[in-house]
Amino acid sequence: MTPLRAALVALVAMLVPPQAVFRTRVDAVRVDVLVTRGGRPVAGLAAADFDLRDSGVRQQIEAVALEDLPLNLLLALDMSASMTGEPLRHLKDAAHAGVAGLNANDRASVLAFSHVVQKRTPWSADTAVVGGAIDSLEAGGSTSLTDAAFAALALREGVDGRMLVLLFTDGLDTASWLDPLAVI
C-alpha cells in the first residue's frame, strides 16, 4: 500500500463514526389467553396446563394470572336522518341489549354521530344513566361514519382495561372529513 493510500484509509477511518452496539434483554413476555369450554371460561388453570412455544421451541411458563378485567363498552350510534323511524327503534333496542349484557364492574359510554360527533355520556357503570342517554337520542342530519369511527377508536386512549366499541349504522357515509383509508 502506498503512503498516500495508507493516509487516505487512516483519514476515512477517523471520519467514519464507530457503529453503535445495542443490547437488549427480555425478562418476561405477557401472553393473553382465553380458554373456553362450551362457550364458558375455564377456571382453575395452572402453568402446567399450557404449552407455549416460540418458533417451535418450548418456553417455560413461570406464572399464570387469572384476571377478570372490567369491560368498557363504547356505543357509537348513527343518529343521521336515514335512521328515523323503525331503524332508530332497532338501533336503540340493540344498544340497550349491549348495556344489559354488562357486569356490575363494567362501564359504558354513548357516542352519537350524524354530521357531528358527540360524546353523550361520560364513562359510567350506572346502566340507567347510559339507558337514558340512549332513549333521548333523535335522528337528524347527514352521516359522518368515518369521523365517528376515528373518534371512537381515539377514546380508547384514556381508558384502563378492556375496551369494546360497538358502532351501529346504516353504513352510508355522507359527511366525513377524514379519509376512510387513513382511519383504517
Image (cartoon, rainbow, N blue to C red):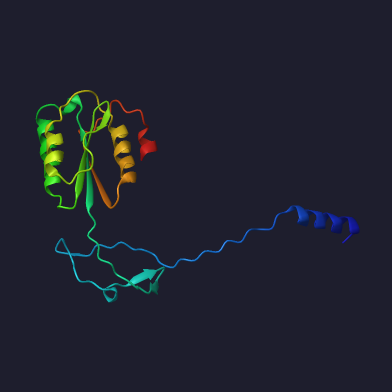
Q: Is residue 14 above or below residue 112?
A: below
Residue found at the very far bottom of the displayed protein: 48
Residue nearer the viewer, 78 or 68: 68
Frontmost residue, 161 versus 101: 161
Residue 132, picture quadrant = top left
Return the x and y of residue 46 as percentages of the image width and height: 26, 73
- In the rendered image, residue 137, in percent from the top left (x then y), is placed at 15, 30
Horizontally, residue 13 falls left or right of residue 43, namely: right
| Residue 80 x %, y % | 20, 27
Residue 52 image position (x, y, % from top left): 34, 70
Image: 123 above or below 177: below
Q: Quadrant of the C terminus?
A: top left
Q: Residue furthest right?
A: 3
Q: Quadrant of residue 128?
A: top left
Quadrant housing the N terminus? bottom right
- At x 23%, y 71%, the residue is 45
Residue at x 13% of width, y 31% of height: 136
Task: Name which residue lies at 13% across and 26% down.
Answer: 84
Identified at 31% across, 34% down, the residue is: 146
Lateral position of residue 75 relative to residue 10, left or right: left
